[in-house]
Image (tube, helix red, strand yellow):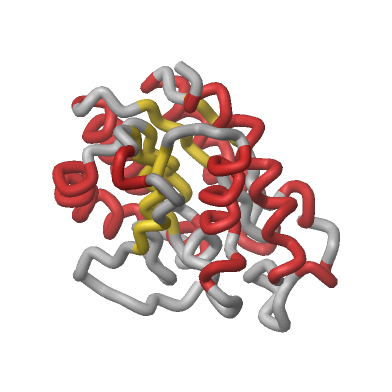
């Protein structure tokens, strides 16, 4: 998952009509899967989320602070700045895939994820932790511990949890770009539907 930006906070604020009066914000902290890598940004699942909020008459704006190539360490390093700047009511945490692909230690990934969740909850934000899977060639011990880590972080923090965002398309190779890592435009509505199931309850609290 290529990294487009290293240290600077990169974000897109997806404003809805009438958003100037909106009092609530969703902050998406993710990697290339949420940054719409390889496709038009306005066709990614996060942009589609902004459109759905409008249709559902939910008074939120969406801030996409996702960076292609981001790791949990990078997210942990910039979360305080992002939260102070945007004051989110809901944080969607979708990091970890790059940690797994690089074979980084699970304990470090968990610590970084937990730091992000704590920072959000300290500002009274509700958090959705989105899990990820990695290919089996990393070995069963690592892949199983990697997958379990997201649920453990969410459970310990009493945060909402979505085990695997790519589940609807995981077996659909036609819905991935040629690199077989990043979803196509056609996959984005399916990803949004998957996220929405876990996110919607947080929006109405």
Residue 11, given in percent of the width and then of the height, sits at 32, 63
Evaluate whether residue 35 shows in this view. yes
Evaluate whether residue 142 shows in this view. no
Q: Taking 24 as reference, is 166 left or right?
A: right
Residue extending furthest toward the front: 18
Q: Residue at x 52, y 71 (%)?
A: 41
Q: Residue at x 55, y 62 (%)?
A: 33
Looking at the image, which is closer to me, 102 or 32? 32
Residue 132, given in percent of the width and then of the height, sits at 58, 48
Rendered view: 88 above or below 18: above
Q: Quadrant of residue 21?
A: top left
Rendered view: 58 above or below 145: above
Looking at the rendered image, the quarter that the C terminus falls into is top left
Q: Residue at x 58, y 63 (%)?
A: 44
Rendered view: 13 above or below 80: below
Residue extending furthest toward the bottom: 178
Labels in figure, total: 0
Looking at the image, which is closer to me, 178 or 17? 17
Q: Residue at x 40, y 54 (%)?
A: 15
Residue 201, given in percent of the width and then of the height, sits at 55, 22
Q: Taking 187 as reference, is 80 left or right?
A: left
Looking at the image, which is closer to me, 21 or 130? 21
Residue 106, given in percent of the width and then of the height, sits at 42, 46
Q: Taking 198 as reference, is 153 left or right?
A: left
């Amino acid at each position: 998952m290529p990294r487009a930006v290293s240290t600077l906070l990169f974000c897109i604020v997806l404003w809805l009509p009438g958003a100037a009066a909106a009092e609530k914000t969703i902050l998406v902290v993710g990697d290339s899967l949420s940054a719409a890598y390889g496709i038009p940004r306005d066709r990614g699942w996060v942009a589609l989320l902004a459109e759905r909020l409008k249709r559902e008459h939910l008074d939120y704006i969406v801030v996409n602070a996702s960076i292609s190539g981001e790791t949990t360490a990078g997210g942990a390093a910039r979360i305080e700045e992002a939260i102070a700047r945007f004051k989110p009511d809901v944080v969607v945490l979708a990091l970890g895939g790059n940690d797994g692909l690089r074979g980084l230690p699970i304990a470090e990934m968990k610590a970084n994820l937990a730091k992000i969740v704590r920072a959000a909850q300290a500002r009274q934000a509700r958090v959705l932790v989105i899990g990820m899977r990695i290919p089996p060639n990393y070995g069963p011990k690592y892949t199983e511990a990697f997958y379990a880590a997201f649920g453990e972080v969410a459970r310990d923090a009493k945060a909402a949890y979505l085990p695997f965002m790519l589940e609807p398309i995981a077996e659909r190779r036609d819905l991935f770009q040629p690199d077989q890592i990043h979803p196509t435009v056609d996959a984005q509505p399916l990803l949004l539907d998957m996220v929405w199931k876990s996110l919607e309850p947080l929006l109405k609290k």
